[in-house]
Image (cartoon, rainbow, N blue to C red):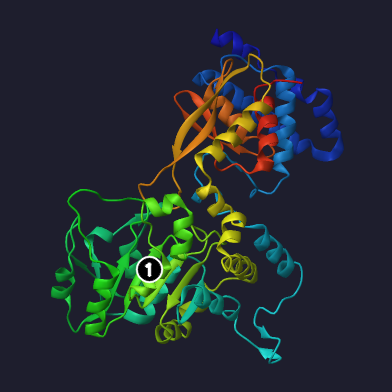
Amino acid sequence: MQSSELSRIPKVDDVLALRAVEAKCEAGFRDSVVAAVRAELASIREGLLSGALQEAPSVGRIEAAVLARVERNGENALKRVVNATGIVLHTNFGRAPLPKAAVEAVNSVAAGYSNLEYSLCDRQRGSRDDHVSKLVAELTGAEDALVVNNNASAVLLALAALAKAKEVLLSRGELVEIGGCFRVPEVMEQSGCILKEVGTTNRTRLADYARALSPACGALLKVHTSNFKMTGFVESASVEELSSLAKDAGLPLIHDLGSGVLNRRIKTLVPMLAQHDEPTLEDSLTGGADVVCFSGDKLLGAAQAGIIAGKKAYIDVMRKHPLLRAMRVDKMTLAALEATLRLYRDPARAMKEIPALHMLSASALEVKEKAERLLRLFSLGDAATLELTETAVQAGGGSVPGGETKSYAVAVGPKDISVDELDRRLHAQKLPVVGRISKERLLLEARTLFEEDLEPVALALAFALEVRP
């Protein structure tokens, strides 16, 4: 069976002789077309040998796949994808999608010149911090704020500016590793501070910090555990407890908040955050943290950035540090961040217009109705089985560790190809569709689909299964 199917794979010259492929060659793309033909035929051969394909595709399918490859080769490598995984803050997909107000702001400043570092009032050089720092302070009650390129940079800058060559106390239970093998202790080492571990993995009390204090200490650090959560016989010191200890010792308390929930009001509006008690910037500051670092592209729902908020005296020290220039953000990031933060002035508007918050706060019924709308768009005949199925998804991006929320997906069971092959074909679309495989079915999660994604997903699935109207 396998050898007979392998023998059905056409030769390179035979595919090049197909009308549409030949026309593409004559249009001046011969080298690209030849490379696409060879790559497609190699992929088919590999699929048959591995068992991912049960039979060789039709000549028409091969022709279409080659043309699609040629087109993809001429496209930008960085492109939009349809996120049907259900993970709202998918790190591999760029985390939070921007609200329309932020996209418009980016377009405005990117297309021409801007007052990035120019004061229109004073008619002289200004600071790029001014566009966002006062807004962060207004929304959080912080004395001052500073923006760098991501949260790891924010922590690195805070430690380098406030505790270089000094000991920084950190619980052993907070020595975390986040995505991409980035470890908090290694970031601390690069700052020039000296990590001093206190407590144990599962239990760290205030007394552990107090015993570790010495004239060599430069700061206390508390870290959000990001992508894991400990349960059972556990204990940790609160921000309030650590703040009191740090204040008595004359040291700054730095809190790596990570996820970036701005305030309690937003937390109450997103059931998943309230249920799993995700910490907020407001809680950290009112609890006594002197410096709080958090991400712009996680639960805040804006562009990638690291935001540092807190006491002005400490922010001023960081603002003058040489590392800041290496970590500063560009005009487009600042434009997106400012526009997103302005939405927070009206929490109801923020919940509606910031995609990450809207997706996370959508009720199970809303998600189910969206999945049903998607299901009604499919017309696949006998090419696949379709079923509406209840699922549970995570926020993603290291936010709300251990937390899940109820969701719904359309489960697709292809008949004539493997689920891996279906997944590969959907990845190869001009607008790639990425779902998740579970129990030999491809799940298309509705929670992370925009309304405008539904029809393209239905068309992409029909094309991948070779279903024609």
What residue sits right under mark 1 in the picture? Answer: 283
* SS assignment at label 1: helix
Above or below: residue 229 compared with residue 194? above
Q: Quadrant of the N terminus?
A: top right
Front residue of 136/190: it is 136
Mark 1 is surrounded, within 10 Å at the Cα level, by few (under 14), some (14 to 19) or many (20 or more) other residues, namely some
Left/right of residue 79 with respect to residue 229 in the rendered view: right
In the image shown, does 419 or 269 lie closer to the viewer? 269
Horizontal and vertical percent position of residue 129: 56, 79
* Residue 55 position in % (x across, y down): 60, 14
Across and down, in percent, residue 36 comes to 69, 33
**Observer able to see residue 210:** yes
Q: What residue is shown at x 34% (from left), y 55% (from top)?
A: 177
Q: Using the rendered image of the protein, determine whether residue 398 is visible from the camera's viewpoint.
A: no
Q: Amino acid at mark 1?
A: Asp
Q: Quadrant of residue 221?
A: bottom left
